Image (cartoon, rainbow, N blue to C red):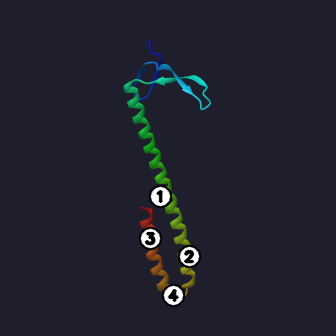
């Protein structure tokens, strides 16, 4: 009888893993045996595919986090510069209106 039962999209009955003893030697010459799991051909392929998907998800998540950080930093820097430009040119309303128009376009481009 199979020991492992995993639930996911459906119920799977998995065969028990095969174990075998492997002989290892230290740099001192000490020999010891370590129990290792030997997977079936199908289980190896499935584990490799799952590991690849997991790596892809984490890479995508890291890329998205980096992109969001860049957006936030750019927006902060641009807002700071726009604020100082508005204050320096507060006497001329046409200049401030132009700066506001440009800032609206820049903000829209960053949010994409």
Which one is in front in this view, the residue at disc 2 or the one at disc 4? 2
Q: Residue at x 54, y 75 (%)?
A: 81
Marks 2,1: beta carbons within 8 A: no
Question: Which circle's residue, 1 or 4, is located before the other in the chain?
Answer: 1
The local crowd at label 1, few if under 14, some if 14 to 19, many if 20 or more residues have their Cα within 10 Å, is few
Question: Which circle's residue, 2 or 1, is located before the other in the chain?
Answer: 1
Q: Quadrant of residue 35?
A: top right
The residue to which callout 4 is attached is: 92
Q: Residue at x 61, y 26 (%)?
A: 30
Question: In the picture shown, does residue 53 fall above or below 32?
Answer: below
Q: Residue at x 44, y 37 (%)?
A: 51
SS class of the residue under badge 1?
A: helix
SS class of the residue under badge 4?
A: loop
Question: Which circle's residue, 4 or 3, is located before the other in the chain?
Answer: 4
Question: Which circle's residue, 1 or 3, is located before the other in the chain?
Answer: 1
The residue to which callout 1 is attached is: 67
Query: Considering depth in this image, is 104 or 79 the residue closer to the camera?
Result: 79
Q: Residue at x 47, y 85 (%)?
A: 94
Query: Considering depth in this image, is 75 or 38 the residue closer to the camera?
Result: 38
The residue to which callout 3 is attached is: 106
Residue 88 screen position, x and y as percent: 57, 84
SS class of the residue under badge 3?
A: helix
Marks 1,4: beta carbons within 8 A: no
Residue 56 screen position, x and y as percent: 43, 44
Question: Which circle's residue, 3 or 2, is located before the other in the chain?
Answer: 2
Residue 38 screen position, x and y as percent: 45, 23
The residue to which callout 2 is attached is: 83
Q: CA distance from mark 3 to mark 2?
A: 14 Å
């Amino acid at each position: 009888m199979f020991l492992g039962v995993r639930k996911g999209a459906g119920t799977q009955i998995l065969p028990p893993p095969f174990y075998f003893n492997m002989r290892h030697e230290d740099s001192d010459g000490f020999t010891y045996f370590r129990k290792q799991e030997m997977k079936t051909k199908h289980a190896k392929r499935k584990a490799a595919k799952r590991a690849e998907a997991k790596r892809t998800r984490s890479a995508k998540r890291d890329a998205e986090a980096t992109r969001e950080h860049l957006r936030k930093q750019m927006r902060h820097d641009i807002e700071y510069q726009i604020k100082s430009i508005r204050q320096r040119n507060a006497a001329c309303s046409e200049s401030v209106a132009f700066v506001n128009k440009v800032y609206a376009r820049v903000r829209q481009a960053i949010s994409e």
